[in-house]
Image (cartoon, coloured by chain):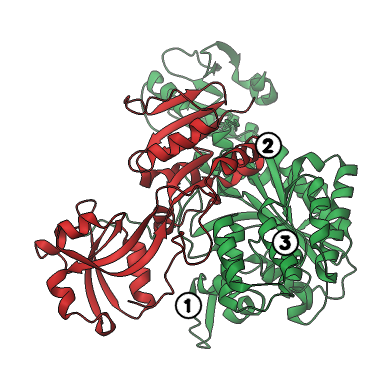
Amino acid sequence: MSERLTLALPKGRLLDGALGLLRDIGVDGIDADSRRLIFTDPARGLRLLFLKPADVPAYVTYGAADLGIVGKDILLEQEPDVYEPLDLGFGFCRLVVAEPRELWQRDDPAKWSWVRVATKYARMTERYFSERGIQVEIVRLDGSIELAPLVGLAERIVDLVQTGETLRANGLVEVAEIARSTARLIVNRASMKTEYSAVTQLIDDLGKRTQPPAPRTGHPRIEPASRRPLQ
Amino acid sequence: MRPVLTQLPKGARIYLPDEVARKRHVEACLFDVFRRWGYREIVTPTFEFFDVLAVATDQAMQGNAFTFVDRETGRMLVLRADITPQIARIVATRLRDEPKPLRLSYVTNVFRYDEPQLAHYREFYQAGVELIGLDKPEAEVEILAMTVESLRALGLGRFQLDVGHPDFFRGLMEEVKTDAAHERELRTALARKDRSTLERLVDEVAPPAHVGDALLALPTLFGHAEVLERAAPFARNKRAERALGNLAEVYRLLTIYGLADAVLLDLGGVRGFDYYSGMYFEAYVAEFGAAIAAGGRYDHMVGRFGYDCPAVGFAFDIARALSVMETQGVDVALPGPDFFIIDFTPEKTAALSLARRLRDLGRSVARDIVTRGLDESLAYARAQRVRRALVVGGPRVPAGEVLVIDVATGRERSARIDAMLEHPERLDA
């Protein structure tokens, strides 16, 4: 391949799945444990960047990377102006509203008119509540969101859950689902045209290695559940 | 503490002299292309009654406009959010009886409450053209060819025009019964080539099988000539067929122009959808994630002002063009003044007369009015990128002579002032 494409990868929970997928298409020998942030795969002509997940969309939008792998949760939060051709199928999780069990036992979401919510996902949280006519005060945090209700910082949280174990361990109960997420392949708008053949080839190859998505009905896929009623 | 009055409103942009020089260069390159294709400039008002914009634009555009109230009438005014509706109105009124086609060009600032990103601000500059009164595909090809020529004139490489036609999708949707929300979601998913969301939506909308297949195929109906063949089986009604026929003809003409390689057909691209009635395109340049130019056919816009008349056009986003040129390392020469006169004599007559003679020849001449040493004056001249310094009087220059210093190289020569006043062009040599 003559053109060299740059692919942005998210460090953290999606990295193993992303590297597994790359191994399937012949990109091998990447030492994710090394502290290097750039890795070049000569066979495929790919340059890999290892980034904080929330930074992947910016690299792709501005063309510092031609493609990127990132969770749908981050795409819904940031709404970057990019192409999103593949659901890669791995890294399933859900964005939910949760609150302490004691509150949950006497709480009626239908009566919410004003809530204070701690979250990393300010935009989605704002959108979710305002679509339902509920005023929301957002406490923007960057980690350990579950702590907020325990110390009285906010009554409720909006956060990602995979197994629900962290919520349970902190005495929290899920009250509503906002969205579902899996890993996505995103592509810079210009790269899709100016590197047309290399980019479409890579999309095709990755598409073939992606597990066939779960049946379309009645199964957890990654749709924004925003129009679903509360509860 | 008193507030410091340095803050700009979000999206406002200042151009400092070097930036302006680059901006003017882009505008001059584009205008030169427009002129060579026979276009003539038009100027529209910066503000209008809001109704004018409302007649010819969608709600998103109206919601993004800067509006204020007219003191005299109490009616709503709007800062120019798009020049094309203004030109459409002018064509329908003042230029209605002119022989067609009209070839109009403009460079203008435009105001929109967009989120500033990718070199895009709330006040931004566009240079573009409108070709009015032609319904033939040659008109589309003319604006595509001009766009390619403009990109080349700017010194840009690795660009691609993304060409689509909204009626292919609209034709498909004629066979689908769905609500506005679903159609909007479908468009968003298509604009992102987001296949998995598209699958969910097709599931929910449950269109006839062949339309469902076509909708799912749209993100892949993207590439060179073969796209037309791949799309043909999906064009099962008049509207979609006509759209495909029009694109095929445009593509055939582009091949004759030798421009087919610069174009990618993209039937799944559905941006700027409400605006265009026919072929539309976006110009992308490698390593920049937004289109730097866009255009297409909008046959209904002039008609909304009471005069049916087909039209095509395109516009460049000048700030984005500048940003891409910087990324691609396109050099823009930023010359300073041709001459800088340093006159140490008390009467300054030599300086003033030399300056006048040179300016009469069209040269740019600045004069050092600050009293300082020669070295400091020359340092200033270098910083201003002056080509030549002319020194009169002072310790180094005998009376009646002028010292000509090439500022970049430091090379010097002497000349008689009276000879130079006779033949000022020799100072250029």
Give the chain ID for the green colour: B
Q: Nearer the viewer, residue B197 or B314?
A: B197
Whole-percent x, y for residue B125 in the image: 58, 55
Q: Is residue A161 left or right of residue A47?
A: left
Circle 2/circle 1 CB separation < 8 Å: no
The subunit letter for the residue under badge 3 reads B
Residue lying at the far left of the rendered structure: A151
Q: Is residue B264 left or right of residue A171?
A: right
The subunit letter for the residue under badge 2 reads A
Residue lying at the far bottom of the rendered structure: B73
Q: Amino acid at mark 1?
A: Phe
Quadrant of the image containing the C terminus of chain A? bottom left
Q: CA distance from mark 3 to mark 1?
A: 45 Å
Q: Nearer the viewer, residue A38 or A185?
A: A185
Circle 3/circle 1 CB separation < 8 Å: no
10 Å neighbourhood of mark 2: few (<14), some, or many (≥20)?
Answer: some
Element assignment for label 2? helix
The subunit letter for the residue under badge 1 reads B
Residue B68, labelled with which disc?
1
Residue B227, labelled with which disc?
none
Q: Is B146 located above or below residue A95 in the figure?
A: above
10 Å neighbourhood of mark 3: few (<14), some, or many (≥20)?
Answer: some
Element assignment for label 3? helix
Q: Which residue is mark 3?
A: B214
Give the chain ID for the red colour: A
Q: CA distance from mark 2 to mark 3?
A: 22 Å
Element assignment for label 1? strand
Q: Residue at x 30, y 57 (%)?
A: A161
Q: Which residue is mark 2?
A: A197
